[in-house]
Image (cartoon, coloured by chain):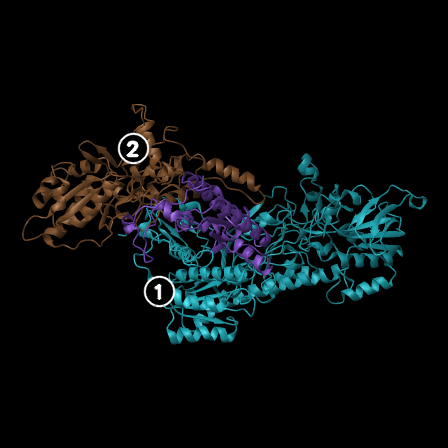
Amino acid sequence: MSTNGAKPKLAMYWAASCGGCEIATLNIGEHILTVDQVFDLAFFPCIADFKVSDVEGYPDGYIDLCLFNGAIRSSENEHMAHLLRRKSKILVAFGSCAYEGCIPALANLTSRQAVLRTVYLDNPSLDNPSGVLPQTTTPAPEGELTLPAFYHTVKTLDQVVDVDYYVPGCPPESHQIWAVLQTVVAALTEGAPLPPKGTILGAGQVAVCEECPLARHEKTIPRFYRPYEIVPKPGLCLLEQGLVCLGPATVCGCGALCPRVGMGCRGCYGPLPGVVDQGARILTALASVIDVTGKPGDNEEELARRVQDAVSTIPDPAGLFYYFSMAHSLLHRARVADNQ
Amino acid sequence: MSTAPSSPKSQERIGVYVCHCGSNIAGVVDVKDVAQWAGRELAEDGVVIARDYQFMCSNLGQELIEADIKEQGLTRVVVAACSPHLHEATFRTACQRAGLNPYLCEMVSIREQVSWVHTDRDLATAKAKALIAGGVERVAWHEPLEPLIVPINPTTLVVGGGIAGIQAALEIADSGYPVILVEREPSIGGHMAQFDKTFPTLDCAACILTPKMVAVGSHPNITLLTYSEVERVDGYVGSFLVTIRKKARYVNAETCTGCGLCIEKCPVRVVDEVFEAGLGYRKAVYRSFPQAVPKYPVIDTEHCTYFQRGKCKACQIFCPTQPKSINFEQKDEIIQVEVGNIILATGYELFDCRRIPQYGYGRLANVYTSLEFERLCNAAGPTGGEVVLRDGVTKPKTVGIIHCVGSRDSKYNSYCSVICCMQSLKFAHLVKERTGAEVYNFYIDMRTPFKDYDEFYQKVLAEGVHFVRGRVAEVTDAARHPGEEGKIIVQVEDTLIGRQRRIPVDMVILSAALEPRRDAQEVAHKFGIACSANGWFIEKHPKLDPVATMTEGIFIAGCAQGPKDIPATVAQGAAAAARVIGRIHQGHLALEPVRASVIAERCSGCRICNNLCPFNAISFREDLGVTEINPALCQGCGTCVAACPAGAITGTQFSNEQVFAQIEGLLMLDFSGAPRGAAVRMLEPALS
Amino acid sequence: MSESERFEPLIIGFTCNWCSYRAADLAGTSRMKYPPNVRLIRLMCSGRLDPTFVLKALANGADGVLITGCHPGECHYLEQNYKAMRRYYLLRAMLTQMGIEPERVRLVWASAAEGARFAEEVTRMVEDVRRLGPLNWPAIAADGAEPAASRNGHGPAAAAETAPVVPEEAKP
């Protein structure tokens, strides 16, 4: 895949993201030396001074491996996605944002206006008496100034361009990143076969429970608790204690870091292979084990009320079940009054 | 949970068959247009041939499909016709004959769901197309399936020792297979044992029933468990494990000879509310009735002096057997039996006539229920067969018999209890015969179908019994006219002459409705079957499968299924037995392969599904850390499939892929039948 | 809107093989009439209803989803409709957050004997959803642009190429 003995080219770009993916990547320790040995950096705004114009100047397919992290939140993000897709042989949706929307996509529960209002108008630390909002074009004496358009809906990378591989996690675990890089390096340097397109790299095949050391039993849950409401018994499955844990609906690979320290899994590694909608999976699983049942002859309305009471102990189900996968879900976003 | 990256549909060769059902479908749906549309517009979805035909279910229709499978190499078949509950088996069998796995056939209901419920031809045609598109998309994801074969344990459990259960037990036992008959009361016999005469032949109930009871009691193939109740049912057709509670009789069946000395010596008299319907007495140690089977008595601890006050033991003292057969220390015994099939013949309950206060039952002494009257005129009953008033001596001179008490009445039971007309005619005849009294029958409609029934009606008419058509408004002792004093007055609108009448009588008999057992719902739940809105057990098909239920291996017979007379009850008992014997003969049963299974490599052992199965099909393998599903126990409901957070459980015949594809197909066309451009395929998940 | 061009919702109905599907059969055999806006899917049990099916139907353009099953206590599989009920109410709470009116996704119990009830509930639901107006989901999901989805399915990859269009104002 590399051309004429020159080192393969590596790019890493951040769209709507926090930078955690870059930190996790640099956190692979001494392996970073191997990466340096194998690759030439072609574009990596976080650690080296490259310009977009540099990328634009590359021939198509110049970059051998592009790790694209961050969701598609603005026209700039989307522009960069198209550009990097064109310039890269292998484009990886790297980290939860690029793969499934992650925290930025929780904004899909609300509208562009609401986001702008919160950030530019209702923000208590901001003084904006004339209510100025960002504009895509602003005339200035020096000429017209432009800003990227801020999208109403946050998208995943594969909703705007074709993606070769996915690496889940918020952020991906460093040892998994290294394993992914090794796979690609082996392919680039030794001609080893690449996994089939669309493969989720750097994760397991089963749920987080597989890696979770907490003891599990049959589950019947009378009600759910928020993390501050109870102190979980050590060593026992958090879900069985009424703490929402997305572990059963989340692919493993992280080592069950959160449940190990008493915090339910939030699902950042995304759904299991083949699952269409992670939120629906945890929703149906949790509802299935709620311990509210009836018997013949029960009053149907009273029964419905008891079910609703138990269900209402899960506040904010949409935010909880789609913590990381809103953009990747079947619905993608909420329907809001000022939808545009 | 996956949809494979490339849909299999392009590889399938699908045949679509649109039935006219005479004019049933074609009268509303443009079936020719539908077939042409499917052939044209669904070609890229794999449809290679689409036909319409007058009657798809006819031999010629089926042959059409078979020929196409063979000649056109069809790999999937969609039949758009009536409900799959009617003809799914027909078309599956046709496919099988032509060498196509029967489960690769899908039925689309365009009769029950389209032509019979819609009137607008264009819209009905549009909906028929959409439903077919759903079927075509779905069938592409079908898989060939093979039925699951389970062995049938030859032992049968019969629950209920009335005439239905007795008949069923005897039929099976006579054909050489073991039966366990469980009866809640101390003796078998049921309601029939309480009756005097049976209509229309007027032969004595005991004369025809007791030989059968004795046959049950002595049959080598029948294990009789009276005074026992089923506690729990585990397992599945072919191998049920039934837990039965044998209530303590305080009488040792092994040593008791049934001599009855204990009964004679017992000092406590108790009103017999069950067998004598409150008209007679029994002892605290008692047999339900002299011909009871089994003959061993039972101690009613609630009334027994020893159990209540700690002394007496007269029964034990006088018991002539060695060792003594009375055992005050006896405890309830829990036993477990393995059976292959179960017949539920749990009978009925009599409507409580107190619920209609204006009929005076419980308030006016000489208002009787039908069961009380049966005991009254029974030669073995409390009055030795004398029809007398509550004073025990006076013969009534006038008797009123009210039909439909608690039946055909929207306030109580809207259904007809079937037996009351004939029973009331029988009562009228018996009253006439025993007392010569004037008899008035108050009826809404006379219902006397079946063999020799109407002849009996004619005979009773000829005997001079009066018939007043009208629902009785009130039964009262408040006299308004001189002739009414000391009488019970039946106030009724005689609808044939259009006048209110007040008829003074000495005795009123209320033909009470038959109602489901009070615990029918509970019993149904225990055995995994369902009750109708009225509370009767629901049969698999009201006409074509009246003794089977939705649950394989559970059959029903007699009044538990709905009110019926003795001939019909016996017929059902025998029918249920025949079904069971057929099963046992086969030795095994092919179960529908609609089953769930765990993909072990995808299971993380989260144990969400572990207690979701009411059939106990799901178990956790501690050694492997994964969950397993027992296919023979699985009933195919799919609840665990829908619950698995990892998508690690799949269900045959109702897989996610099939449902997703059907949703896409159904939404292919808009309301008016135009293609919906916006029908979006889901985002394909990235697959490893 | 005039009567002739009034909004006609599409509703996907999920039925239980043992009760509500038979209720639909009974409505048919009794020649009861209900509007042709509902398209039914047969499941073995309401317990089979994966909430994903509902999301899928809505995402694919259904304006409403009708979920039907045996009355509580009458489940052919004994108690699986209780599970359906729990999922339904949690799903409904979630869908409310997603801006989908609870009336659009309805749970109705109908026994095999309740053909009339089935027909009535379908009629009522069609009228209710008609009042709510179109859901327009594919457009909403795609940020106002119709996703250029291919029927053989590779996601709305090309959606970004199309100019955003403002969808019909979503009704609160």
Q: What residue type is labelled 1?
A: Glu
Location of residue A250 in the rendering, given as x and y in whole percent from the top left corner: 31, 43
Q: Is mark 1 on a helix, strand or loop?
A: helix
Count of numbered circles on the image: 2
Q: Label 2, label 1: how many angstroms apart (C-alpha)?
A: 53 Å
Q: In this view, does B20 lie above or below B601?
A: below
Q: In which quarter of the image is residue B137?
A: bottom left
User: Which residue was labeled with disc 2?
Assistant: A261
Chain of the residue under label 1: B
- Of C169 and B611, which appears nearest the observer? C169
Q: Can residue B157 be seen in this view?
A: no
> How packed is label 1: few (under 14 Cα within 10 Å), some, or many (20 or more)?
few
* The C terminus of chain A lies in quadrant: top left
Location of residue A135 in the rendering, given as x and y in whole percent from the top left corner: 27, 35
In the shown orientation, is residue B187 left or right of residue A254? Answer: right
Chain of the residue under label 2: A
- Of B145 and B188, which appears nearest the observer? B145
- Palette colour of chain B: cyan
- Palette colour of chain A: brown
In the shown orientation, is residue A270 left or right of residue C27? Answer: left
User: Which residue was labeled with disc 1?
Assistant: B44
- Chain identifier for the purple-coloured part of the image: C
